[in-house]
Image: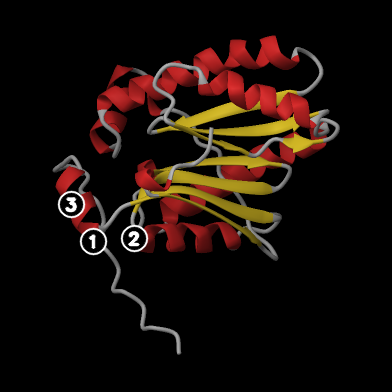
Amino acid sequence: MTVRPSIRLTLALGTLAAASLLGGCAPLLFGGAAFGTAMMVTDRRTSGAQVDDQAIELKSINRINDVIGERGRASATSFNRLVLITGEVPTETDKTNVEQSLSRIENVRSIVNELAIGPGASLGTRSNDTLLTSKVKASLIDAKDLQVNAFKVVTERGIVYLMGRVTEREANRASDVARGINGVQKVVRVFEVVSEAELAGTQPTNPTNPPPAPAPAPAPVK
């Protein structure tokens, strides 16, 4: 399955000199009922999409195990029914088979397959990825002109994957934030880009935590 232009997804890969990454998880998987409810209020996905994303990720665990077993390590992250596959598998055939298996899960609309071919990442590498994820998360929170709940961040082997339903300004700003974290090797953007008008028309309101006002558009580079 391929990324379809009709759903206006952008996949941009850029090598970064230094940056860090944040690993995000489905909001309903953490905390108590009150926390989960607050996350749903500020999440830009519909409640149905959030539930579907959780179901997709859970079903992916069994599908991946059936396809590669102990031969590799792969994980699936779903945002608004777009699935990002990361990890390592030994062969191109395994990479293709994992993608095909996940594409048959109900409600999956598109897949971005970023599985690497080669040996699995070491424990040290995975620990470093977790640290980078935490740093990026914190940096996104510190960025006052971004709504942190709009993003999911996945880190693999120093590569930062940014997911979310965001405007072009937010996509660029979040990428800049990731670039500012020491240790990030590359940033991959897997965004669903919407206009400011589209976002305003679908963004749920939360009087106690309103979304930040958009920053002025930068002057064109000549």
Would residue 30 be seen by someone viewing this image from the given angle?
A: no
Q: CA distance from mark 3 to mark 1?
A: 11 Å
Mark 2 neighbour class, 10 Å CA radius: few under 14, some 14 to 19, many 20 or more = some
Label 1 sits on residue: 213
In terms of secondary structure, where does tag 3 sit? helix
Residue position marked by numbered label 2 in the rendering: 145
Of the pair 67 and 75, the residue shown nearer to us: 67
Gap in angstroms between the C-alphas marked 2 and 3: 15 Å
Residue 115 horizontal side relative to residue 124, left or right: left
Q: Amino acid at mark 1?
A: Ala
Q: Quadrant of residue 94?
A: top right
Q: Which mark is residue 203?
A: none
Residue 98 screen position, x and y as percent: 65, 23
Residue 194: x %, y % from top left: 30, 53
Q: Secondary structure at mark 1?
A: loop
Q: Amino acid at mark 3?
A: Ala
Whether pointer 1 and pointer 2 mark residues with C-beta atoms closer than 8 Å, the reply is: yes
Of pointers 3 and 1, the one earlier in the residue sequence? 3
As drawn, 49 above or below 115: above
**Total labels drawn:** 3
The residue drawn where x is 33% and y is 56% is: 167
Give the mark nearest the N terminus, 1 or 2. 2
